[in-house]
Amino acid sequence: MELKIKNVCCIGAGFVGGPTMAVMSKFCKEIIFNVVDINQKRIDAWNNEDLDKLPVYEPGLKEIVSKTRNENLFFSTNVKESIKNADMIFISVNTPTKKSGLGAGKASDLKWVENCAREVALYAIGHTIVVEKSTLPVKTAETIKRILHYETTANKNFDNKKTFAILSNPEFLSEGTAINDLENPDRILIGGEDEDAMNELEKIYLNWVKKEKIIRTNLWSSELSKLIANAFLAQRISSINSVSALCEVTGADVNDISLAIGFDKRIGKLFLNSGPGFGGSCFKKDILNLVYICDHYGLHTVSRYWNEVLRINVWQQKRISSIIVEKLFGTISDKKITILGLAFKANTNDTRESPAIKICEDLIEEGAILKIYDPKVKESQIKKLLPEKNQVNWSYYSSVLEAAYDSHAIVVLTEWGDFKDLNWTEIKKIMKNPSWVFDTRNIIDVQKAKSSGLQTWVLGQST
Ligand code: NAD
Ligand code: UGA
């Protein structure tokens, strides 16, 4: 297939930009992919010879990077040069919730996206296809278009022959399964008005994705679909988490409920695992953004509806920390509690918005001394997460056994495979009596834990 695109630039070498471009470089050998970032440390990590030191941990990622890096995949801080050379530019920068000013606490902060648009306007040469890869509020393409238009026409030094086409191509990967999600996507969504630009982007994906999976819509449907997809996914988690509490008091088992309702094709089996609430960098921020947009358009009932999804999430986390305190005779002051897992889900080192962090903060507030172990989250990372003033209240260990030694209770907060088959007999021997295990992920072998003499509490079960 004839490809016009020869040189791609991706602005933002984060959890999305890095893996996405790595997969594209694997399937599109004839295209050069330049991934650029203003964060020198991050770029150095992407270029580290030791592939275990890449800044993002994703199963399958280092194998791809080892083959394509410095072949047709390059990481650098040379934003200007990479924009100049690009026929297509992916904007894949962070879009966190605004911290101050209008819409603070809800609206997305588009500062980084705007900066990118200005840099693209400044350095691009000839015709450039600009692709929104970041998750953005509906109508952001309008802002990008305006910036590109005003910057290029207002500045007399600019080459007036610069032209741009804007596309929306949201990313639906999940962390921990990013490479599989990118290689076998459920769908690729391309929103735009310029048919030629849409064809060019489609041609890239056709190197490994079937045409039937490529959906084309207008810009606004594409931008909004991404927010709605995340809102629907988060809503399922809040729904099953609300049910987990009901199961605990009625004798029903939340796993049975998930199984029974999931068999209904209209409901589906996936995304029905109850847990300590959803974390990660996106669900909360995207729903807050949706709530903000609804309020902006005067749709207050709609905004309240989506806001409840967030409220249940906070409630679930608080509920878990309260149960731990209650079971440990109403006080955890000076009690050692082992925390297994800090990542917001398994198979990632990402702790952004992790429910585990919120629960740890609550337990520290109650006076507990936490002994933390996570297979992928480093001690240096935890130092940034749990405030320094609390450092006497937590310490980091490099194995389950070390973390469990001398503690009153173990709390399983991330569903790491290593935690599914723990040697409870050995663990029980080194813990204080009575020893508790709280499983917020429904993954441990409860019978084995019980028969080893541990007291157990499992989310969504009336144990
Ligand atoms: P991230 O914070 O990991 O990475 C963003 C990178 O952009 C950072 O390294 C930052 O230094 C860089 N950056 C910011 N401004 C820049 C500029 N002007 N020039 C060069 N680099 C710049 O973020 P992420 O997790 O990769 O998310 C990026 C976007 O993708 C967000 O909008 C997010 O909502 C969306 N998204 C994320 C995921 C996910 O799983 N993390 C999945 C789908 C969509
Ligand atoms: C989520 C979406 O799944 C992706 O499609 C989307 O691209 C991405 O957000 C994004 O826009 O950033 P991610 O946050 O990486 O991906 O991970 P998920 O697998 O969705 O998990 C999110 C949270 O929900 C985790 O804390 C996880 O433990 C929790 N979860 C997930 C449950 O509690 N139960 C479930 O059944 C599934």
Image (cartoon, helix red, strand yellow):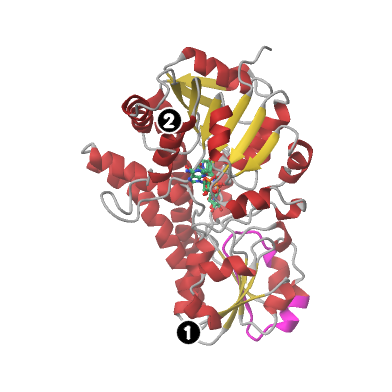
Residue 121's label in the rendered image is 2
Q: Tell me the quadrant of the picture where the N terminus can be found.
A: top right
Regarding residue 111, the answer to whether it shows in the image is yes
The answer to if 427 sits in the magenta stretch is: yes
Percent coordinates x, y for residue 389 in the rendering: 47, 80
As measured in the structure, the alpha-carbon distance from the residue carrying label 1 to the one carrying label 2 is: 59 Å
Percent coordinates x, y for residue 282 in the rendering: 47, 47
Extreme residue toward the left, this view: 298
Please tell me which residue is depicted at 52% across the width and 39% down the height of the picture.
Answer: 92
Taking 195 as reference, is 191 above or below it?
A: below
Which residue type does callout 1 highlight?
Thr
Taking 18 as reference, is 344 above or below it?
A: below
Residue 331's label in the rendered image is 1
Query: Pointer 1: residues within 10 angstroms few (<14), some, or many (20+)?
Result: some
Magenta range is 426-446
The answer to if 198 sits in the magenta stretch is: no
Q: Tell me the quadrant of the picture where the C terminus can be found.
A: bottom right
Please tell me which residue is depicted at 68% across the width and 21% down the height of the picture.
Answer: 207
Residue 140's label in the rendered image is none
